[in-house]
């Protein structure tokens, strides 16, 4: 891939969301992004390093372009689910209330049957006591008949004792019957209250469970949104940082190029100055030699210059000019 080829800007249209944000639905985007950064820049150069930063920034931008509409689509899905959750909660509550209302006659009937059973048990106990009292009276009668002679002697006392015994037996029977009735009614009332309390506790438990589920769902939604926001912020910060790093790399590259240019210009200027200084130095020495030949050898200027050139060219043995 050419270093100057950038990834085309990815775009997800709203109507594409249902078919893209499914299992493996984004594979084609991943393949496209991988293909766009399939190169190995030279990290030993500023240009190569800047290219790596640019490729990484391309990936971040592509990720954001696909992720943001996906997050928006996910948020809409969650909002769409809320009415269903609320309606389902209302439906369950109404059904529980309706169930209790429908069952109330049966519950009351069961309580009444329990009360009737308790009363019947009390009545059976009363009959048993009466039977026992009758049997006791019969036994007492038989004893009285067998002890007729003694009874005749103790008739008054016996009658009083018998009356007292019969009265006491009747009192105990009535008291026991009343106690059994009271216990039956109390048992029925207590069981009815316990049943009603169990129903209330179960309803409260279901309501608490539904509330806890709703609160957990809300916490999950908030956490997901906060995570998405943090990721989006981090992506923006990372993209800005990578952009700044790329700018700094280009700035350093330009500064290095400018420094190299100035160094080259200085080198050329220094070489030119050196050449000019050397030429002036050689010219000064040459002028001094020519003047000396004219002054001391009686040569004309033209002859003196010719002798200087012959010495410089090495045509006169054992002589040289030191510059």
Image (cartoon, rainbow, N blue to C red):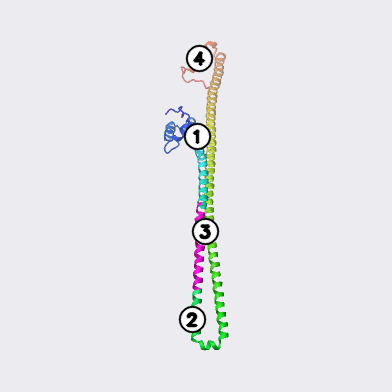
In the foreground, 189 or 7: 189
Q: Earlier in the sequence, mark 4 or mark 3?
A: 3
Pair 4/1: label in front:
1
> In this figure, which residue is indicated by the disc labeled 3?
195
Q: Disc 1 or 3, which lies upstream in sequence?
A: 1
Disc on the earlier residue, 2 or 1: 1
The answer to whether residue 245 is above or below residue 137 is above
The residue at the point 54 percent across, 67 percent down is 181
Of circles 2 and 4, which is in front? 2
Q: Tell me whether the residue at label 2 lies in contact with that at label 4, contact meaning CB atoms closer than 8 angstroms.
A: no
Using the image, tell me which numbered label, if any, was put on residue 307. Answer: 4
Q: State yes or no: discs 2 and 1 in contact (Cβ < 8 Å).
A: no
Q: CA distance from mark 4 to mark 3?
A: 141 Å
Residue 280 drawn above or below residue 18: above
Q: Which residue is mark 2?
A: 139
Q: Quadrant of residue 297?
A: top right
Mark-to-mark CA distance, 1 and 3: 54 Å
According to the picture, the residue beneath numbered tag 1 turns out to be 69
Q: Which residues are magenta?
A: 102-129
- Residue drawn at the location 48% of the way across and 78% of the way down: 135
């Amino acid at each position: 891939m050419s270093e100057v080829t950038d990834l085309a800007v990815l775009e997800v249209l709203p109507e594409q969301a249902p078919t893209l944000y499914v299992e493996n639905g984004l594979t084609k985007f991943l393949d496209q992004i991988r293909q766009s950064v399939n190169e190995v820049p030279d990290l030993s150069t500023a240009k190569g390093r800047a290219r790596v930063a640019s490729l990484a920034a391309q990936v971040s931008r592509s990720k954001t372009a696909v992720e943001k509409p996906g997050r928006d689509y996910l948020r809409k899905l969650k909002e769409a689910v809320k009415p269903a959750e609320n309606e389902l909660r209302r439906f369950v509550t109404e059904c529980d209330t309706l169930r209790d209302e429908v069952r109330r006659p049966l519950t009351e009937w069961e309580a009444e049957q329990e009360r009737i059973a308790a009363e019947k048990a009390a009545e059976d106990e009363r009959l048993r006591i009466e039977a026992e009292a009758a049997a006791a009276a019969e036994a007492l009668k038989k004893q009285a008949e067998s002890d007729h002679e003694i009874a005749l002697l103790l008739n008054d006392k016996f009658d009083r004792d018998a009356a007292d015994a019969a009265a006491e037996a009747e009192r105990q029977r009535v008291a026991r019957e009343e106690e059994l009735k009271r216990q039956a009614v109390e048992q029925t009332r207590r069981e009815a209250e316990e049943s009603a309390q169990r129903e209330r506790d179960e309803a409260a438990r279901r309501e608490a469970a539904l509330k806890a589920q709703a609160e957990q769902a809300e916490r999950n939604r908030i956490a997901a949104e906060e995570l998405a926001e943090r990721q989006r912020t981090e992506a923006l910060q990372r993209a800005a940082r990578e952009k700044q790093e790329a700018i700094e790399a280009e700035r350093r590259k330009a500064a290095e190029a400018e420094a190299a240019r100035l160094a080259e210009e200085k080198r050329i200027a220094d070489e030119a100055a050196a050449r000019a200084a050397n030429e002036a130095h050689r010219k000064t020495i040459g002028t001094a030699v020519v003047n000396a030949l004219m002054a001391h050898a009686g040569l004309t200027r033209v002859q003196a210059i010719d002798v200087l050139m012959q010495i410089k060219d090495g045509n006169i043995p054992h002589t040289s000019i030191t510059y």
